[in-house]
Amino acid sequence: MEEKRAQLVDIVGEAGVIDHPDVGESFSLDHELIPPLKPCFLVRPQNVDQVQKIVLWANETQTPLVPMSSGAPHFRGDTAPTAPEAVIVDLSGMRRILKINRRHRLALIEPGVTYTQLQPALQEEGLRIIMPLLPRANKSVIASLLEREPVMSPRYQWNLLEPLRSLEIVWGNGDKLWSGGGVFRGEREEEWRMGLVPLVGPGPGQLDFYKFVSAAQGSMGIVTWASVKCEVFPECRKLFLVPAEKLEDLIDFTYQLLRFRFGDELFIVNNACLAYILGTEPAEIVALKDTLPAWVVVVSITGGHIFPEERVAAQEDDIRDIAQRFGLKLMPAVPGCRGSDLLNLLLQPSSEPYWKLRYKGGSQEIFFLTTLDKTPSFVATMHTTANEQRYPVPDIGVYLQPVHQGVGCHCEFILPFDRQNRAEMDRTRELFREASFRLFRQGAFFSRPYGIWAHMVYNADAQTTMVTRKIKDIFDPNHVMNPGKLCF
């Protein structure tokens, strides 16, 4: 171990190597059956050259590497080592915003850049990036996009990786590759004037290399740089709420909004999920759950920078007409929630404590892809399973996010639990396992297979498993990148 430590110090310096970091709470807040192993070191590289040297060193010494770029807490176990004597590669120190260009609506960032850091910098240039629902303040933008966390704006999402474009990747064998237009680094101003900018995601050639590292949980390589597409910051925006007592009453209305590309932010939540977003402490959350409507469509309208007020007014009239055709009301506020207050929350990362932890201190998530019309049946299955496991159904938060311009839907169940109550943790764990299996058999597509989901997904598709392992052998022949995840 001392020899390994000395070799790492030669690469990143004495301050960049930390012995025996505290795992447990820091690296995984989920409660999977297999506890994470303690890594031997945590290293903090400062540039891509150091990252490449670490990966080459790992191949020489057969040392497992676990990439990480977001701050604690971590929920899903993808940053928790499952191989002995692993080294955590902490990329949070690589946090430079290399370039923001309004004309091309593009930002070049390193993996340590967070939404808290990026959004104000973009706004100074009159830009913004479409965000997931209330990300953690220390959440890495690149990590969020690589893991395909759903964004709140389906109209801007041309594929599930939007707004991610070109990448700089250090593969598990130590080779470095620029995907898409990444070879045009845009480091000189004349390159931008000539249009030589990393605007394209797929490629080079006929392969979409950036897809090999998406939702891979760091098992293929390490991304050290990315270009992300931005949108013009709107000069005028409003947020409206459309309440209903039954989820089924909102499905066709939401499909109609998606058809006409109405709404910048557009999603559906139940009263529990909205209470977790709005509330700041348990007592307030309980009161909100009793006050808020059972289901709410959240839709924001923006006006861009050309006739913004007129565009917002026209969209508002059209959406109100659509709502009336379905027997619904477009409202600026509902009992327990004003649209203006919710809008202020959605435009920035979550405040502390993280919104999913405010109610009981712990939270387990179940999420998958489906289509919006099938979500009521999945909600019914979740409620039935919760009743059988004696889990309080009113505590289950439901978040439905249309993705890819409404082609699909991210369906997420939020299960709060008290981490100090062993019986409650066991009950939530059992609900998580049983509900995951039932939802999978019902047709839920776990496109981001963390933990036990990986066994479900890959055991059901031998052909995909074989191809995935072949790709792993090409880019990480010694299997040093986060072993034990996915089907590896």
Image: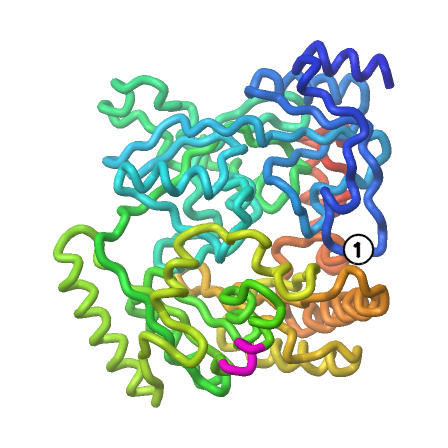
Q: Residues within 10 Å of mark 1 (few under 14, many from 20)?
A: some
Quarter of the image containing the N terminus?
top right
Which of the 4 image quadrants contains residue 272? bottom right
Question: Tag 1, which secondary structure?
Answer: loop
> How many labels were placed on the picture?
1
Q: Residue 263, position in %: x, y?
A: 32, 65
Taking the magenta stretch, the answer to whether it contains residue 289 is yes
Quarter of image, res 123: top left
Residue 198, placed above or below residue 448:
above
Which SS type dominates the magenta stretch?
helix
> What residue range appears in magenta?
287-291
Where does residue 142 sit, x and y in percent of width and height? 51, 39
> In this view of the protein, can residue 88 be seen by the observer?
yes
Q: Where does label 1 land, which residue? A: 32
Looking at the picture, tell me which residue is in the foreground, 122 or 251. Answer: 122
Horizontal side of residue 417 vs 187, given as left or right: right
The answer to whether 172 is drawn above or below residue 57 in the figure is: below
In the image, residue 253 lies in the stretch drawn in magenta: no
Residue drawn at (38%, 72%) of the image:
338
Residue 486 seen from this side: no
Q: Quick check: 53 left or right of 388?
A: left
* Residue at image location 33% in from the left, 60% down from the top: 264
Q: Residue furthest bottom?
A: 327
304 to 169, vertically: above or below: below
